[in-house]
Image: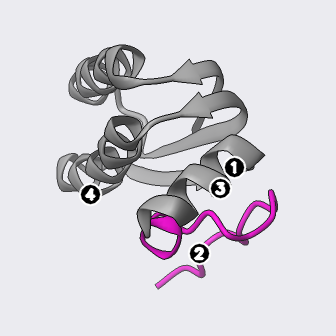
């Protein structure tokens, strides 16, 4: 498992870089699980929310399980306003979900 802490502003420019970096990481790594810790994000725009949603939907196709954890108030507020809170599962109030049960 690889855990990445995101901090600062997540906007169209930084989200594009994040997407590109994670694509390269997934292509070159044997990591099967990626946790994106969003606790340090101080700003998030709509483009970033859709980028996060795209990351959560596409990396599993490459064999990488992705979880968003510890959503900051900025992430939760932006996701609620955009109607993406449920889709991104960011209404947990900062709690990390329990690990998935083995099949």
Asked if labels 3 and 1 touch by Cβ distance under 8 angstroms, the answer is yes
Asked if labels 4 and 2 touch by Cβ distance under 8 angstroms, the answer is no
2 vs 4, front mark:
4
Tell me if residue 56 is in the magenta stretch: no
- First in sequence, mark 2 or 4: give its number: 4
Counting from the top left corner in percent of width and height, residue 103 is at 46, 85
Residue range corresponding to the magenta coloring: 84-103
Q: Residue at x 71, y 68 (%)?
A: 97
Left or right of 70 on screen, residue 101: left
Residue position marked by numbered label 3 in the rendering? 76
Counting from the top left corner in percent of width and height, residue 48 is at 39, 36
Instruction: Mark 1: give few (<14), some (14-19) or many (20+) Cα within 10 Å.
Output: many
2 vs 3, front mark:
3
Residue position marked by numbered label 2 in the rendering? 100
4 vs 3, front mark:
3
Residue position marked by numbered label 1 in the rendering? 71
Between the residue at mark 1 and the residue at mark 4, the CA separation in whole angstroms equals: 18 Å
- Give the quadrant of residue 38: top right
């Amino acid at each position: 498992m690889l855990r990445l802490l995101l901090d600062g502003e997540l906007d169209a420019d930084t989200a594009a870089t994040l997407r590109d970096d994670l694509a390269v990481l997934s292509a070159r790594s044997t990591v099967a699980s990626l946790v994106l810790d969003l606790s340090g994000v101080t700003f998030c725009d709509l483009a970033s929310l859709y980028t996060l949603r795209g990351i959560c939907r596409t990396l599993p196709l490459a064999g990488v399980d992705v979880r968003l954890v510890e959503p900051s108030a900025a992430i939760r507020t932006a996701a609620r306003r955009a109607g993406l809170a449920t889709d991104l599962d960011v209404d947990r109030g900062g709690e990390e979900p329990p690990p998935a049960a083995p099949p």
